[in-house]
Image (tube, helix red, strand yellow):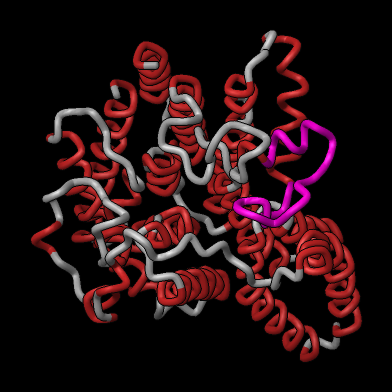
Amino acid sequence: MILLILSIACIGGYNLCQSFDHEQLASYILLIAFVMRIGYMLYTPCTLRPHDLKNISIDSDGHAAYILNILEGHLPTSNEGQFYHPPLYHILSALVILILKPILHLTSDMDVINCARVVSCIFSCITLYCVKSLCYQLKINNFIPLSMVGFLPNFYLMGGRVNNDAIALFFMTLIILFSIRWYQDQNTKNTVILALSFALGMISKLSVAILAISTGILMLCTLIKSFKEHNLFQTIRGLCLFAAASIPLGLSYAIRNFVLFHQPFHYVLDVGSAGFISQNYSYFQRFLAFPITKMFNPIYNNPYTDYNLWLYLLKGGLYGEFRFHIAVAIPAIMLFIYTILSILMMISVVCSLRDKDIEVSYLLLSATVLLVSYIIFNIKYPYGCTMDFRYVAPVFIINSLLFGRFLDKHHDKKFSMVFYGISGGVVLIFSLLSIFMFCII
């Protein structure tokens, strides 16, 4: 991985020195980010740093058993454990396994399930293309957003894991992209792709539907605008097409589970409170305070002993809920730099509140909806694992875009040029440390 990345960096550096081009720079960032995701996926077995994998047996009730049921030719016959999830990720994983099994001569269930990580890795890589397209759509210099999303360690973890987090993140990013495109042009193509993004996202993970709130408000604004412009009929026709293409497919599995198992549409598996101490702390300690003394001691999260949402989220963006067998200096420096970047992102988000651009307002609204949903989720389920970064990962993508936009908007001012240079340098150092750490662990 190191050799391949150095080769790409040398070739890219030489070409960019000959003739600098933003698109070419983005291509090299994407290529190195792909190497990181594919490399991590290849050298990490599915049993290392998993979420809800459980025993690799058809008699279990985790994501591995879900896929093994699909390979047997049927959906799970209950909604126990992880079987309550919609099936798209597991169906795609089964298809990949059916293709690779004879080619690689796979025999054991462990080898078979390891192949399912290919699906997560592919969607993790494609998400980067969505971020690149969002930069283009919002007229943002793509270096900072692409680098931050491309080299945030938690996205490597998602891309090397057997569960539906990576595919859900992809569809949520795609929804954000095509909501903006639909607002700018309500043609049939944008309408259908946006509808399918919701539908396929909801049969990957039902929580994708939360973006219907912000996209719905954007559609309402478009409806009011079209009424003023005497174009109401065309907009209503587009919204009917959207509903017809998204609702039946998107809700199909939720309806199936409701009919078969009386599973509520908002159902989330309750893992139980045993062993988690976060429920014993006050709302102030969990949601309003920030225990800075615990910032670097310990470096990593512990879902059983940690209780503060924001500190957990900060560390979780880098390392999730896991520990790494590496000298503590590199993770500590990365956490320090990531904290600086998080502060800069928060400043850019606050400054964006004054922006009257409807696309920026939509991004802010989407981030707010996701964050409020995440907090409510943690109030309802006061456990350490519910604070995990993966439940609010799209907010990081949105904040990265707003950060990049803020820097672009003010880069021609004297002070801001210095700020832009410092920010770019901090992102570069963070990216290099991230690459180095995950090439040697």
278 sits to left or right of 237:
left
Quadrant of the drawing holding the C terminus:
top left
Return the x and y of residue 109 as percentages of the image width and height: 63, 23
Instruction: Please tell me which residue is depicted at 60% across the width and 53% down the height of the picture.
Output: 81
**Place of residue 144 in the rendered image (x, y in percent of width and height, measured from the top left):** 38, 47
Q: Which residue is drawn at 48% across and 36% down?
A: 26
* Residue 211, quarter of the rendered image: bottom right
Q: In this view, does 271 lie to the left or right of 166?
A: left
Can you see residue 31? no
The quarter of the picture where residue 344 lies is bottom left
Q: From the image, which quarter does the N terminus lie in?
A: top left
Q: Does the magenta stretch include residue 84?
A: yes
Residue at 83% x, 41% y: name it: 74
In the picture, measured across the screen, residue 79 lies left or right of residue 141, that is right
* As drawn, 13 above or below 390: above
Q: Is residue 328 visible?
A: yes
Between 105 and 24, the residue placed more toward the observer is: 105
- What span is in magenta? 66-87
Check the image and report above or below for 170 versus 403. Answer: above
Where is residue 112 shown, x and y percent of the image?
64, 23
In percent of the image, x 74 and y 46: which residue is there? 88
